[in-house]
Image (cartoon, rainbow, N blue to C red):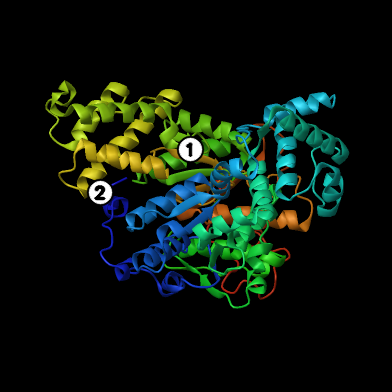
């Protein structure tokens, strides 16, 4: 984070309701002002959908049209819910509930269980893998770690699609689902797993939704209580709702129509978990009088990146493709995407690490660079290459920032120093806030220079360095702020899961990158069998893989690199081919099966010159 970001990190709360609308484009403003009746926002990648819906809620609250406690905003990840709470706080709209579906349902379940069922709510099973393993063992099956993960995923899919064990084999056949085991065997494991839960009085995360649905359906008095509390609903990432989540939402809303949904069918990438864009695409059918707003002005990516993204979707097929949005970049021209081919994976990883190092040397912060891949097993070779190049990195999907041990320890130390004030000898000579924070955190492992290499020591330092940078930015935005003020800010951020930026190149799967963005993105391992993944067989599955690559492309603001390698290991057989999704888009390739006239401004970008990997080919 740099001084240039002070205003966005700690913005002034708008003084009036109308000031909340300042800076919104015409379509975003239309969203913010549509506060009554059903509203459907079709929002392309990078078009400011979170900005639009948080300003909508904030304007409604500040103008007295919406009561904060009567608004429930739901999304799919704790990070997204935390970001929403953080933005609402900055806009002066405190008291609004912004939660995940599971968090909102669990809260209601805990409150109403004694009245609806009696006694205490069964214990929530944090990780179901162990119980699934036991269920498999009772069915005389031993599953390795990968098989356990796949079988657990199947049970989760069955539950969110409201499929009971007896119906699972038929559901697999109907959906052409690629089950990891014989469906009849999986149904037996699923049934045994459910029995084990009952025997031990535990519930899993899917049960939280199922039980909440059951109570709201059976107890009209409780359903009326919930509807009396929440009058206005906002659903983010609506293309990702499962049938079970939609059922719960219907029960929350009842026969009212104050519902705003936001989504993009072209970013549906979680159908394997039961998500479906049908609810988004059918919204106008279910709500004929709905206000529909399309956000297509892309503020994130350069015209070059947007052109490639539009080109990817111009060749797409299926219902989601028929409703795709043609993005229009609002940014200045940038560099063309780089396409690179390498003889093997180690060469690809080493060249990527060198290019990352060059970008950092040119002034791009490490925290603004990401390397994205299709499956997590691809990360190891990149971890090693970055470590060898002396480049700091972080793996996406680690525990949340404020739950890290070193962050909790740092918070305790800062709280103690704030209470002690000038009586703490640690603060002797530390005149300003940032100096005081540096002095306190130096006792926890922070140093002016980062430790060499990677690993746990470097991860700890990066966490503490993020707190130091936050303190520097906080002081710059609020001159005269004290250590007590900073501790209060950290507490509010922890409650909202509004984490500061950790400086390190991000390594993440394409699925984990959803909802994030970076200045520079490297999409690696783009070969047939990996993109699309080998087990994607049907057209619907292939199209989801295309959308996954589209999500990856649209994470990049300025620099975008797409690469692949012809062999896995040095000297190996060079029998790999680059992904079909880049046919007609990368230099030297021809389009295959492009949809004539579809996609508007999307198209073929053949580029100029040789690809960056041509010399190594």
Lateral position of residue 440 relative to residue 531, left or right: left
User: Does 186 sit above or below residue 249?
Assistant: above
Q: Quadrant of residue 148?
A: top right
Task: From the top left corner, tell me how far across and down residue 530 is, in percent.
Answer: 68, 44
Q: Residue at x 25, y 26 (%)?
A: 416
Locate the C terminus and report the quarter of the image it occupies.
Answer: top right
Lateral position of residue 336 relative to residue 578, left or right: left
Q: Quadrant of residue 441?
A: top left
Q: Quadrant of residue 165?
A: top right
Q: Residue at x 73, y 55 (%)?
A: 542
Does the image show residue 617? no
366 or 473, which lies in front? 473
Q: Which residue is mark 1?
A: 353
Check contact, mark 2 vs mark 1: CB within 8 A: no
User: Does 456 sit above or below residue 253?
Assistant: above
Q: Which residue is mark 2?
A: 3
Q: Residue at x 34, y 65 (%)?
A: 62
Task: From the top left corner, tell me how far across and down residue 487 is, in percent.
Answer: 28, 37
Task: Look at the numbered disc 1 and give the secondary structure of its residue.
Answer: helix
Q: Which mark is residue 482?
A: none
Label 2: how many residues lie within 10 Å, few (<14), some (14-19) or many (20+)? few
Task: Look at the numbered disc 2 and give the secondary structure of its residue.
Answer: helix
366 or 59, which lies in front? 59
Q: CA distance from mark 2 to mark 1?
A: 27 Å
User: Does 257 sit above or below residue 312?
Assistant: below
Task: From the top left corner, tell me how far across and down residue 181 is, in percent.
Answer: 83, 37
Q: Nearer the viewer, mark 2 or mark 1?
A: 2
Task: From the top left corner, tell me how far across and down residue 563 is, in percent.
Answer: 58, 47
Upstream in sequence: badge 2 or badge 1: 2
């Amino acid at each position: 984070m740099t001084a240039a970001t002070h205003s966005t990190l700690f913005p002034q709360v708008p003084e009036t309701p109308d000031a909340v609308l300042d800076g919104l484009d015409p379509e975003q403003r239309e969203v913010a002002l549509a506060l009554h009746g059903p509203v459907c926002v079709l929002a392309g990648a990078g078009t400011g959908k979170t900005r639009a819906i948080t300003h909508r809620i904030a304007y409604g609250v500040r103008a007295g049209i919406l009561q904060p406690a009567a608004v429930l905003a739901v999304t799919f990840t704790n990070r997204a819910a935390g970001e929403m709470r953080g933005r609402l706080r900055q806009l002066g709209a405190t008291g609004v509930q912004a939660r995940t579906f599971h968090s909102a349902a669990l809260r209601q379940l805990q409150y109403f269980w004694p009245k609806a069922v009696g006694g205490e709510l069964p214990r929530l099973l944090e990780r179901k893998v162990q119980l699934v393993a036991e269920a498999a063992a009772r069915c005389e099956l031993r599953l390795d770690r990968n098989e356990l993960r796949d079988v657990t995923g199947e049970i989760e899919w069955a539950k969110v699609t409201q499929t009971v064990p007896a119906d699972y084999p038929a559901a697999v056949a109907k959906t052409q689902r690629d089950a990891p085991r014989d469906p009849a065997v999986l149904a037996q494991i699923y049934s045994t797993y459910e029995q084990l839960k009952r025997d031990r009085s535990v519930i899993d995360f899917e049960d939280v939704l199922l039980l909440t649905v059951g109570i709201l359906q059976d107890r009209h008095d409780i359903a009326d209580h919930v509807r009396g509390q929440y009058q206005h609903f906002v659903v983010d990432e609506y293309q990702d709702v499962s049938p079970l989540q939609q059922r719960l939402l219907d029960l929350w809303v009842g026969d009212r129509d104050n519902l705003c949904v936001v989504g993009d069918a072209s970013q549906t990438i979680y159908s394997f978990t039961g998500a479906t864009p049908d609810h988004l695409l059918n919204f106008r059918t279910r709500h004929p009088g709905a206000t529909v707003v399309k956000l297509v002005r892309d503020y994130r990516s350069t015209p070059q990146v947007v052109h490639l993204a539009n080109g990817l979707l111009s060749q797409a097929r299926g219902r989601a493709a028929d409703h795709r949005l043609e993005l229009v970049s609002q940014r200045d021209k940038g560099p063309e995407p780089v396409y690179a081919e390498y003889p093997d994976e180690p060469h690809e990883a080493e060249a990527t690490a060198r290019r990352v190092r060059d970008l950092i040397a040119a002034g791009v912060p490490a925290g603004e660079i990401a390397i994205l891949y299709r499956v997590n097993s691809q990360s190891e070779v990149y971890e090693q290459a970055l470590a060898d190049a002396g480049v700091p990195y972080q793996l996406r999907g680690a525990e949340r920032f404020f739950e890290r041990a070193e962050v909790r320890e740092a918070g305790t130390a800062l709280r103690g120093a704030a209470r002690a004030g000038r009586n703490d000898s640690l603060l002797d000579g530390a005149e300003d806030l940032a100096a005081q924070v540096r002095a306190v955190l130096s006792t926890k492992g922070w140093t002016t220079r980062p430790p060499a290499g990677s690993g746990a020591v470097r991860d700890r330092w990066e966490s503490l360095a993020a707190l130091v940078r936050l303190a520097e930015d906080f002081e710059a935005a609020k001159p005269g702020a004290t250590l007590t003020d900073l501790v209060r800010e950290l507490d509010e951020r922890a409650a909202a899961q509004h984490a500061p930026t950790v400086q390190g190149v991000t390594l993440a799967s394409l699925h984990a990158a959803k909802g994030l963005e970076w200045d520079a993105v490297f999409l690696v391992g783009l070969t047939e069998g990996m993109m699309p993944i080998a087990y994607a067989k049907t057209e619907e599955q292939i199209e989801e893989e295309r959308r996954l690559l589209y999500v990856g492309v649209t994470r990049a603001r300025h620099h975008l690199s797409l690469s692949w390698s012809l062999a896995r290991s040095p000297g190996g057989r060079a029998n790999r081919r680059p992904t079909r999704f880049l046919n007609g888009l990368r230099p030297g390739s021809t389009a295959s099966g492009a949809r004539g006239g579809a996609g508007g401004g999307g198209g073929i970008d053949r580029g100029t010159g040789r690809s960056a990997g041509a010399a190594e080919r």
